[in-house]
């Protein structure tokens, strides 16, 4: 670890920041990969297919750690999407398979262009997306927008500290655990301690290289199975 800088009074101070602020806000343009694409969520156009995809989670376990859902009827999901998914923050994206079918949701939120910080959240992958290369690629495409396109300094992931799969996913994707905020909020009538994870801009080059190596066509066999696991900085 580098020694901190000292000011004229001998006090330690942070490193200088050369970026200009505010940073641009995320656009609503499409992000495209080889396994999936992400488009700004259109509640009217996407609700029906998403309801069908989410319904494949027959016991509703994917909704446990979200503050909303499960939705028993398509109209209920459509109503929630109309109210929650059409704004600019959170900025929801629908994840599409190669045929253009909606199979999941994710969003940018708590967008702070003045300091260059942004969070990924409201991640809801249907069974059609889970444990598929598209799930990893979708997260990479969002990271690439944040760091490469927009020049943000910090990208956050927060989840219920009891949500072990989400914590594990964050670390697999290269996010570093930064601590747990006790009794940070409550939802569905229960307490939530929130685990915080983040990637910062100096982490990104190594993480990006790991994603690009993992997503290389040579890393997948004829059945679409990975040959080598994703090896991010913290994996």
Image (tube, rainbow, N blue to C red):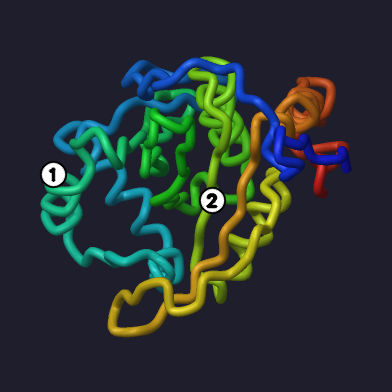
Q: Residue furthest bottom?
A: 190
Residue 212, x across and y down, in percent: 75, 23
* Label 2 CA crowd tier, 10 Å (few <14, some 14–19, many 20+): many
Measured Cα–Cα span from mark 1 to mark 2: 24 Å
Q: Is residue 54 above or below residue 230?
A: below
Q: Mark 1 vs mark 2: give the one in front.
A: 2
* Label located before the other in sequence (1 or 2): 1
Q: Residue at x 72, y 45 (%)?
A: 11
Q: For this view, does 218 lie left or right of residue 124?
A: right
Q: For this view, does 12 lie left or right of residue 98?
A: right
* Label 1 CA crowd tier, 10 Å (few <14, some 14–19, many 20+): some
Q: Residue at x 81, y 25 (%)?
A: 213
Residue 105, x across and y down, in percent: 38, 43
SS class, disc 2:
strand
Closest to the observer, 117 or 52:
117
Residue 113, x across and y down, in percent: 39, 29
Closest to the observer, 126 or 20:
20
Among the 4 quarters of the image, the one containing residue 187 = bottom left
- The residue labelled by disc 1 is 82
Residue 141, x across and y down, in percent: 55, 27
The N terminus: image quadrant: top right
Q: Residue at x 31, y 45 (%)?
A: 50
- The residue labelled by disc 2 is 157
Circles 1 and 2 in contact, beta carbons < 8 Å: no
SS class, disc 1:
helix
Numbered circles on residues, count: 2
Q: Residue at x 67, y 37 (%)?
A: 14
Q: For this view, does 9 lie left or right of residue 43?
A: right
């Amino acid at each position: 670890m580098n020694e901190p800088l000292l000011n004229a009074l001998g006090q330690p101070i942070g490193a200088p920041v050369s970026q200009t602020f505010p940073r641009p806000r995320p656009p609503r343009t499409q992000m495209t990969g080889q396994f999936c694409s992400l488009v700004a969520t259109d509640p009217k156009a996407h609700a029906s297919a998403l309801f069908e995809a989410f319904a494949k989670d027959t016991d509703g376990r994917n909704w446990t750690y979200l503050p909303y859902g499960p939705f028993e009827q398509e109209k209920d999901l459509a109503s929630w999407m109309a109210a929650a998914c059409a704004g600019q923050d959170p900025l929801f994206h629908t994840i599409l398979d190669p045929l253009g079918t909606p199979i999941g949701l994710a969003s940018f939120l708590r967008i702070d262009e003045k300091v260059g910080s942004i969070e990924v959240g409201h991640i809801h992958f249907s069974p059609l997306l889970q444990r598929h290369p598209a799930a990893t690629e979708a997260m990479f495409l969002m990271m690439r927008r944040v760091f490469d396109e927009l020049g943000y300094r910090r990208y956050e992931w927060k989840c219920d500290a009891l949500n072990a799969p989400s914590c594990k996913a964050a670390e697999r994707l290269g996010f570093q655990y930064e601590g747990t905020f006790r009794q940070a909020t409550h939802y569905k009538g229960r307490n939530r301690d929130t685990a915080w994870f983040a990637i910062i801009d100096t982490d990104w080059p190594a993480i990006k290289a790991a994603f690009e190596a993992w997503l290389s066509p040579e890393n997948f066999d004829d059945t679409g199975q990975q040959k080598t696991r994703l090896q991010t900085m913290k994996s």
